[in-house]
Image (cartoon, rainbow, N blue to C red):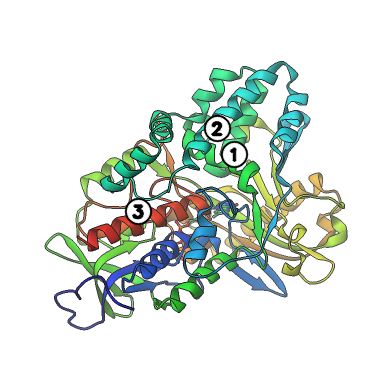
Amino acid sequence: MTSHSAQPRFAPDGAAFDVIVIGAGIGGLVTATQLITQGFSVLLLEKYLIPGGSAGAFEREGYRFDVGASMIFGCGQRGTTNLLTRALAAVGQSLETVPDPVQIHYHLPDGLMLKVHRDYEKFLVELTERFPHEAAGIRAFYDECWRVFNCLNRIELLSLEELRYVARVFFQQPLACLGLARRLPLTVGAIAKRYLTDPQLLKFIDMECYCWSAVPADRTPLINAGMVFSDRHYGGVRYPQGGVGRIAEALAEGFVQAGGQLQYRSHVSQILTERGRAIGVKLATGQRYWGQRIVSNATRWDTFDRLLTERPLPAAERRWRRRYQLAPSFISLHLGIEASALPTGTHCHHVVLEDWSQLAAAGGTLLVSIPTQLDPSLAPASRHIVHAFTPSWLSAWQDLTPAQYAAKKAEAAEQIIQRLDRVFPGLAAGVRYRSVGTPRTHRRFLGRTAGTYGPIPRPGLPGLLFMPFNRTALRQLYCVGDSTFPGQGLNAVAFSGFACAHRVAADLSR
Ligand SMILES: Cc1cc2nc3c(=O)[nH]c(=O)nc-3n(C[C@H](O)[C@H](O)[C@H](O)COP(=O)(O)OP(=O)(O)OC[C@H]3O[C@@H](n4cnc5c(N)ncnc54)[C@H](O)[C@@H]3O)c2cc1C
């Protein structure tokens, strides 16, 4: 493996690399794999024992649970937006995936039960049956999302901070680029209200957004919705055989096979700086490493508040914090249940809400995944795994004694089980294993401020216009992952990883 660039000027007490990546979440892994295949020397430091972060997995009593994500986009075989497939292929990896025939089965107030079928027309028919007076508007709204997707799916998705790339893509696909630029400041809410008027249907569109963006339609960027609302019918939602953790494991394997250096149990406690530039990292053990470029896959809050404590917060970060706020964390309940407790034909992903006014409230929307519906190997014979999670704020879980904390967890778990039992009668009696995670768990194991799901735009922000790219105000320091363009979700942070690697490679090759 040859290196593109000279070693750093000095490396007093540690090894020197072209690039050091802090964190092996999907954002960090995609950056690291993209850079290693371009011949750079890369050190990837992960504080935990396994890769994946929010897309990791854990095993208990014969069950293999997903830490977080389980509705996976970007694993298709066509177009340019299948970024997980592409990231894996770049390091010689591929995964078997199981196509999900229904993205979500909604169980909503006023008896609004709906399935988002993989087949676009089938979905539109089902939705239109509920809202026949909105037939034309429904098609117009979702077709507008397709127009966004078709623009994205025509261009190579790399760094919008790299002007030569932007010029090249514009020259190759001028209409697609103009189509995207025009829609960058738009939110889903604005488009939905252009085509739809029924208040209940608009609430449904709010939920279509909230269940992945953590904000209702009027705060969800249209670009992101164009991806989600269309790719589910194009590349499709697919579940990786062996669990979502396989994606990160395969990327990590490919990275090491390509010559990358990956260290687990390596908690970065400080980003080292010199004359206004990032030049290395220090681990909690005191070990230092030197790199020409430093990439942080920790959130922007964690990067600037915890790893750069000796420096004042840059003005650009202060501005960003005025525009974006922390999304809540979750109470996550992982269950092992008797397979007989679920009716035959139950789908993998469900969204449950009993009262529209609680859509964005703590403990309101309940998101449910049953991945063993697609891959039974994740549980012992005749069992299913269920992951049910609902928003929760760290503040509700602080200042508790250990006994109070345990009791509150048990109470939260019981409430979720009772809600599940109303959707799947008999489920409560079939529970054989349970494990509860709180915002404290998310904060501790994922290293994310307040255990947050990520940044959410404050009201009134124009679409994706102000979401930062990968470069930061500190020279030679880059951020990657869900607090960079285009935001949360595995395929989105893979996009961020491709963009970050592209920008770093361009900077190192100057
Ligand atoms: C409950 C839940 C459900 C979700 N469901 C879905 C879904 O169905 N579909 C979907 O697409 N997305 C889903 N998401 C969102 C998706 O999982 C995330 O947006 C994405 O995984 C974030 O990736 P990331 O690389 O930005 O960060 P992370 O996953 O947070 O990874 C960051 C990594 O950096 C490491 N790290 C942090 N600080 C340090 C440090 N100082 N030193 C060393 N290492 C460090 C962490 O340990 C972690 O491994 C879900 C998220 C959650 C929490």
State the mark number for residue 145.
2
State the mark number for residue 230.
1
Q: Is residue 30 above or below residue 108?
A: below
Decide if residue 357 is on the left or right side of residue 324. right
Q: Amino acid at mark 1?
A: Ser
Pick the residue in front: 401 or 93. Answer: 93
Q: Quadrant where the C terminus lies?
A: bottom left
**SS assignment at label 2:** helix
Instruction: For ligand 1, tell me if the residue under mark 3 lies within 8 Å.
Output: no
Q: Does residue 275 appear in this view?
A: yes
Q: Amino acid at mark 3?
A: Arg
Decide if residue 427 is on the left or right side of residue 450. right
Residue at point 46%, 55% (across, down): 494
Q: N-terminal of the two: label 2 or label 1?
A: 2
State the mark number for residue 300.
3
Neighbours of disc 3 within 10 Å: few (<14), some (14-19), many (20+)? many
Question: Are the residues flagged by discs 1 and 3 in contact, CB closer than 8 Å?
Answer: no
Q: Nearer the viewer, mark 1 or mark 3?
A: 1
